[in-house]
Amino acid sequence: MSDQGLSQSGWLPGLVEQGESDPVWDSFAAQVRKGLGVPLALVSLVGADRQVFPGQARLWSPDDREGSIPSCQGFVPEAVRAGSPLVIEDTRRDPRFADNSATTEHGVVAYAGMPLTDESGHVLGVLCAIDHSPRRWQTSELEQLSWLAERCSAELRLRLARSDTEYERAHTDTLQEQLRSALYRSELLLTAAQSFSDVDSVVELRDRIAELVAGDLKPSRVELIITDSRSTAEDQCDPAPPGDKRVVADGQWDEFDPEGPLLSARAVRAARLLTYADLRTDDGELSTSGRAHYLDAGMIAVTAAPIIDIDGVVGVLEFAWDEPHRTELTERAVIVTLANYVATALHRIRFLRRKLSVVHELQRAMLTAVPVVPGARIAARYFPADAGEQVGGDWYDVFTLPARDGEQAVTAVVTGDVVGHDIRAATIMGQLRAMLRQACWDLPSGHSPAQALTALDYAAGNLLPRAATTALLAYLAPVDDGTGRWMMTWSNAGHPPPIIITPGHGPDIVTAHDPLLGYPHLITAPRTDNQTMLTFASTVLLYTDGLVEHTGRSLDDATATLAHRAADTPATNPDLFLDTILASIAPHGGPDDIAALAFHIT
């Protein structure tokens, strides 16, 4: 072990917390495991008396982690002492390691480790690949492991540099400018780690990048280019306006040529950071056409960092300056780390997109098509909230209850809203919708909507505690007197009032209601049924509060506006009726889900 570095310094602040995982170190280990096809890869750092594993990637459960072991155990001490790669095909046949606890207790058979060093060359740890069977390590595998170890060392040096800046500031005035720059870069990375953690779209990620790099790096332009085959239209970013001099990031994956002459394409092919300090004089490998592309745009210096996740290169971050700019080692480390954070953010964005897509599909699947009811036309609509991450508990339902003892068949219509905008609300919605159907079937048409809601309330109170919900249940049946009238019997559990439109009359907002569902122990009086006679050509509009809450006016005013809009809209075609109302009231959706249902007597 070197006489400097971790062995003397202990666990340096900001470098790694002993025994805790780190997503950056984990990403290096994951790339080793996937790239070399091994069951286990580790980032190991050695301290005065312990070695820790902040980065781990294995085939079995990620929760099966080992935080630290004594510094004298395993193969890392030997690699650190030698200061060179340690490659073993079969540890059981190697007299140095045949009796090592890693071999006898942990089943390590094949081992390849590359040293991790600080800027002075002191070995601080090892990036290693482990197999549980004998293995002849290929030259290409060791080269890939060595390249990843260099990148891992850059991250290690960055964290060491970050901790050193506080000491330098306290002891010298001559290093103030360097210290300020180092602090900025450290803060930039910390801010990036936090800022990128909650982005939910490529456009938002693009904007966050632009905000972050406008400081000390001072590029004239930075482009985020997504290159992998999973790119979709949702990954497309609008380019910067012509003549815009601010720092921007453009997503133009559909125009990107990975075999082209640009530095960004070369960085993707090489899977490593590439840089030119002055394209006018640099005699590097960039082609004449590639050089002309940047110079014609007024760019003199350019640096391109590939964005690499577990599946390989998925994009590139390209920084350009309109004057000569030499990207120093620490600045390169900042750019590479930013690219790593962007890779993590892109992975999260796509995971959330897939997750939300599944949730929305399941939510829509629960909202079945309305049935055909003789003597009536029915239409329903559901729109999720316009905030992409929100799913909700709004629903509608229409089903027919069987006719009994000469009674008319009854059509049950429902709109409801579970409080909340998350997967839990959507899940509860699905359960309540099914439970209410069952309650209506168990209490047939001769019983009341109030009794069905009461049964639902008590069942939900036991099975789904604290599931605060509003709902309106109505039973509609034709009156057998030849007039074409229908009787609507309904009960309202804290839901927005139904609106009844009768030709030749103004809209009727029926405001009677009982408390919401979810707190049966607070109900002091039985739920009530209400009855309204509907004449020929009448229309009943049921809806959730998302249709009236986003208008910026009081609920009473918004409901009145909705009622008059409904009265002014022809209702003989309920589908067109709903589409017209929604287009005028909420053309772009709103912050809450919207469910609406129209029942028109023909």
Image (cartoon, rainbow, N blue to C red):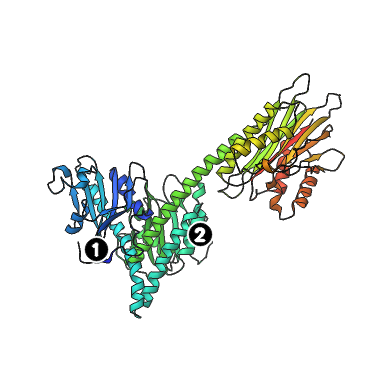
The residue type indicated by label 1 comes to Ser
Local secondary structure at mark 1 = helix
Q: Residue at the spot x=35%, y=65% of the render?
A: 13
The residue type indicated by label 2 comes to Asp
In the rendered image, the quadrant that contains the N terminus is: bottom left
Residue 569 coordinates in the image, percent (x, y) = 78, 42
In the rendered image, the quadrant that contains the C terminus is: top right
Residue under pointer 2: 207
Note whether residue 280 is visible: no
Q: Is residue 288 left or right of residue 218?
A: left
Q: Residues within 10 Å of mark 2 (few under 14, many from 20)?
A: some
Numbered tag placed on residue 7 in the rendering:
1
- Judge by depth and name the residue closer to the eye, 195 or 1: 1
Residue 411 coordinates in the image, percent (x, y) = 73, 29
Note whether residue 485 is visible: yes
Q: Residue furthest left?
A: 95
Q: Residue furthest bottom?
A: 173
Local secondary structure at mark 2 = helix
Q: Residue at the spot x=24%, y=41% of the render?
A: 132
